[in-house]
Amino acid sequence: MRAVRIHEHGGPEVLRVEEVPTPTPGSGQALVRLEAAGVNFIDLYQRRGLYRLDLPVTLGQEGAGVVEAVGPDVQEVRVGDRVAFTNVQGAYAEYVVAPVWRLVRIPEGVTSQQAAAVMLQGITAHYLTHSTYPIQPGDVVLVHAAAGGTGLLLVQMAKRRGARVIGTVSTEEKAHLAREAGADEVILYTQVDFREEVKRITEGRGVHVVYDSVGRDTFDRSLDCLRPRGMMVSFGQSSGPVGPVDPLVLSQKGSLYLTRPSIWHYTATREEILWRAGDVLSWVRTGELRVRVDRIFPLPEAAAAQRRLESRESTGKILLVP
């Protein structure tokens, strides 16, 4: 089978399309023939070496397809089932072996491409809005990168929970998309200081929570956007890692809360995966949650797909198809 692997860390040029043996599922595993794979920032972090893995390794952690074979002691899925997953290494390939407890059946009415586009980012938006900071009706929230793959889903879920949503974007085109997703206010951070705009919009009170996937470029000013006892949720670093934080700063700025959540800790059990993925996929099926696919690349063009994501010009999800 074909797989996109890296033998060293570096830029997109280190991605190689190689022929490797098709894996065989062991106990508690299933072989999935992939129909679509998601391209995510964690793939870039692994490629660069920010998140270290034993090399060589096949990139990709999110995908959807059809179960081709199962190993011993498998009851959760059967051959022929349409399934989706996230946080399973090796999705940039034609086949992947996955632990069955992480596989979710795709409901009728949802395509494999939709499922692959929404598993990681949809579940992320779900745990951020339902668990990390459980949004209450009337809360005011700030969503950075509101027209990105996760940002568009975050905006929609925050609105479902009754929030007033302020989004930041870089262009007028992205502002239009954020408003379509339901954002009440959209700030073009390339034209104005988003910190000052948030203060103006909230009449100096600040927001209850900031959802920040950008990292280094926005972190310090995001703290200034919070009201006393507000929560800073730093869940990504597309602009680079955040530097060291003095806890005393959180006290000085209003007894703030700071968290750096990981999807691993919010999908630690099969029950939790089924809850979050079940909500997300059912909302996609009914049209309550709209999934925007930015670009679809053939598997051999994984480097171009990553460059597209790295440029931060994408609006929505980037997919690979075998």
Image (cartoon, rainbow, N blue to C red):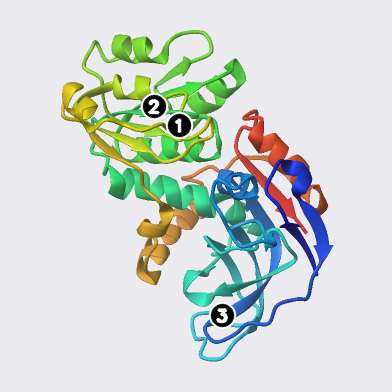
Label whose residue precedes the other's in the sequence (3 or 1)? 3
Query: Exactly how many numbered labels are in the figure?
Result: 3
- In the image, residue 275 above or below residue 237: below
Q: Mark 3 points at which residue?
A: 29
Pick the front one: 273 or 218: 218
What is the quadrant of the C terminus in the image? bottom right
Q: What element carries label 2?
A: helix
Q: At x 54% / y 50%, what residue is drawn? A: 51
Pick the front one: 8 or 80: 8
Image-based side of 244 in relation to 285, left or right: left
Image-based side of 11 in relation to 176, left or right: right
Label whose residue precedes the other's in the sequence (3 or 2)? 3
Is residue 295 something that shows in the picture?
A: no
Residue 215, numbered label: 1
- Tell me the amino acid under the disc marked 1: Gly
What is the quadrant of the N terminus in the image? bottom right
- In the image, residue 204 above or below residue 70: above
Is residue 145 something that shows in the picture?
A: yes
- Tell me the amino acid under the disc marked 3: Gln
User: In which quadrant of the rendered view does residue 245 lie?
Assistant: top left
User: In which quadrant of the rendered view does residue 32 lie?
Assistant: bottom right
- Mark 1 crowd level (few <14, some 14–19, many ≥20, 10 Å Cα): many
User: In which quadrant of the rendered view does residue 315 lie?
Assistant: top right
- Mark 3 crowd level (few <14, some 14–19, many ≥20, 10 Å Cα): many
Pick the front one: 50 or 226: 50
Do callouts 1 and 2 mark residues in contact (Cβ within 8 Å)?
Answer: yes
Q: Mark 2 points at which residue?
A: 219
Q: At x 70% / y 58%, what residue is drawn? A: 92
